[in-house]
Image (tube, rainbow, N blue to C red):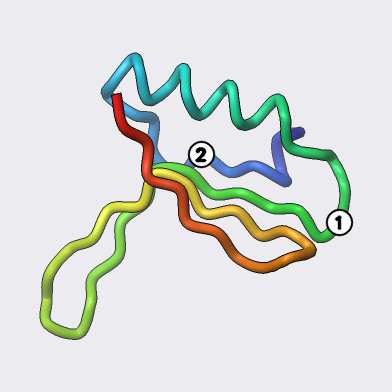
């Protein structure tokens, strides 16, 4: 997936996570409506911060991916 369709919000500090994200990135198509955002956080209404490894928008829906070593 080309830059612009894939946005790295923050670089991962973990080598295994960077490798995993790159392996996924090269498999995703360079076409609409495919989009991806990696390594970002958001704050829920309770004030807790949540981390997302990868969020991918596909023709079939929105998918959140959690990478494990």
- Is 50 drawn above or below residue 53 in the view shown? below
Residue plotted at (35% across, 17% down): 16
Q: What residue is at 79 percent from the left and 63 percent from the top?
A: 59
Please determine whether, in this image, residue 34 is positioned above or below residue 21: below
Residue 53 drawn at (x, y percent):
39, 44
Q: Nearer the viewer, residue 29 or 7?
A: 29
Tell me the mark number nearer the camera, choosing from 1 and 2: 1
Q: From this viewpoint, which residue is outermost toward the left?
A: 47
Task: Pinpoint residue 6: horizontal percent, then vertical percent.
Answer: 65, 42
- Is disc 2 placed on a helix, strand or loop? strand
- Numbered disc total: 2
Q: Label 1: how many residues lie within 10 Å, few (<14), some (14-19) or many (20+)?
A: few
Residue at 67% across / 68% down in the picture?
Answer: 61
Label 2 Cα crowd, 10 Å radius (few <14 / some 14-19 / many 20+): some
Q: Where's residue 68, x and y in %?
A: 31, 32
Q: Which residue matches tag 1?
A: 32
**Residue that mark 2 sits on:** 8
Q: Secondary structure at mark 1?
A: loop
Q: Residue furthest right?
A: 31
**Label ID, residue 49:** none
48 vs 68, left or right, is left
Residue 26 higher or lower than 5, as above or below: above
Gap between marks 1 and 2, in whole Å? 18 Å
């Amino acid at each position: 997936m080309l830059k612009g369709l894939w946005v790295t919000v923050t670089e991962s500090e973990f080598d295994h996570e960077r490798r995993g994200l790159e392996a996924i990135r090269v498999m995703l198509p360079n076409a609409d409506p495919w989009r991806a955002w990696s390594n970002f956080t958001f704050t829920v209404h309770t004030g807790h911060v949540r981390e997302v490894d990868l969020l991918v928008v596909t023709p079939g829906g929105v998918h959140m991916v959690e990478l494990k070593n």
